[in-house]
Image: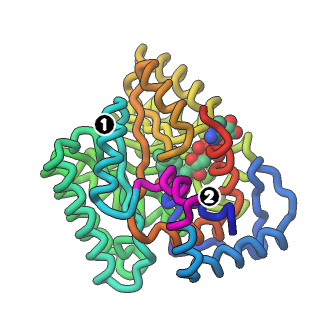
Amino acid sequence: MGTLPLTGHILPIMVTRHPVSSAGSSWSTGDGRNRGHLSATSVARQSFLWASHLGAVQRLVSTSAVTRPLVHRFVAGETVDDVIAAARRLAAQGITSTVDYLGEDVADLAAARRVAGVYRSLIRRLAADGLASSAEVSIKLSALGQELDEEEAMANAHAVCKAATEAGTTVTVDMENHTTTDSTLEIGRRLRAEFPSTGLVIQAALRRSEQDCRGLARPGSRVRLCKGGYQEPVALAWQRRQEVRTAYVRCLRNLVEGGAYPMVATHDSALIEVSRRLLERRFGTSLAHEHQMLYGVRPEEQRRLVRAGERVRVYVPFGDQWYPSLMRRMAERPANLALVLRALRSRR
Ligand code: FDA
């Protein structure tokens, strides 16, 4: 179990209520090639799911002198105080943040309302501590009840957006797996009618995304463009690394041409450079966008971009449910391990 805790903390972004079955789908490996390691993947998936239920393993991981500092590299902590401190440290380096609360799967609507309540208190704290201009929040509709009752999820998201607007900050709605894309975009559209600064996320790996980008490409539209953190079926998603990269550039071009505000969420140096050039060509300045990276991943690159005059926002997860969340993310897509292992090896 030694390496598991090192892997998943950075992947709270991948919360889903609908894990895509591996049956019949080809799993992509970390380098984007399909190698047919279905049995190894299945074993890994079962192990992660099994580990997600083990409180003893969580206690060991949380308290071990060896793993604790590594856990803290990728998760700001368990409490609002912890994440406020992290946002303050980032702000002091000229880096803005988007804070994600790691909740468990919500089993009922009362739990979904509790998650919305945590976000509202967090937002009030950000405002009270003078961080509202440098820290926003990222929400997952699944944690707000999307699977149980879409209207309830909409109402919870609305309450969070309202609190954010009153506090002078913004909300970005994370994108989960493909089964929720239409619902998430529709809720996002409704939120934007009242809170136009609401950010939405597009996953370049999905074949539909170029079209979705065209639909979102207009001035003032905040769109986080990421590769996509879920293993999706071949019929719906590009599988090879290079295909995903070129799809990413096409999506970005659509956003830029429509005058949207792209939030370039990747650690991939090639894409960071391409986006910089593309935006410079379009606007004559690199300021009409921002880069986004995960807490603890490529911190030196984050600082380098700031020094180069770029806007950088870091996605900062916190919460006491980081462990099961992490294990499920690994079960959904064990290839995500590669990102974390690289982050641990590299200082760049
Ligand atoms: P990827 O893992 O593909 O790596 C590409 C290249 O980056 C590597 O080959 C290497 O060159 C370089 N690299 C990476 N790490 C490095 C390191 N430590 N040192 C040196 N080089 C390194 N997903 C989703 O489905 N829904 C969502 O809402 C979000 N939200 C989100 C927000 C933010 C702020 C980020 C950064 C990401 C997400 N994601 C997401 C996750 C995203 O879809 C994707 O899974 C991960 O970012 C990994 O893809 P990358 O493009 O970052 O690098």
Left or right side of 244 for 117: left
- Residue bearing mark 1: 220
Of tags 2 and 1, the one toward the viewer is 2
Does dot 1 land on a helix, a strand or a loop? loop
The structure residue drawn at horizontal position 77% and vertical position 47%, both measured from the top left corner, is 31
Q: Secondary structure at mark 2?
A: helix
Does 143 appear in magenta?
A: no
Q: Is residue 15 visible?
A: yes
Asked whether, in this view, residue 196 is left or right of residue 327, the answer is: left
Residue sitting at x 40%, y 50%: 200
Q: At label 2, which amino acid type do we have?
A: Thr
Vertical side of 162 occupied by 248: above or below: above
Residue 318 in the image: state x and y as whole percent.
39, 59
Q: Amino acid at mark 1?
A: Gly
* Up-down relation of residue 306 to residue 124 (above or below): above
Depth check: 135 or 3 in front? 3
- Rendered image quadrant of residue 70: bottom right
Height in image: 147 above or below 40? below
Residue 193: x percent and y percent?
24, 53
Q: Which mark is residue 7?
A: 2
Q: Which residues are magenta?
A: 63-76
State the residue at coordinates (51%, 67%).
Answer: 63
Q: Is residue 68 magenta?
A: yes
- Say whether disc 2 or disc 1 marks the residue closer to the N-terminus: 2
Q: Look at 77% across and 55% down and name the residue there.
A: 29
Q: Is mark 2 within 8 Å of ligand 1?
A: no
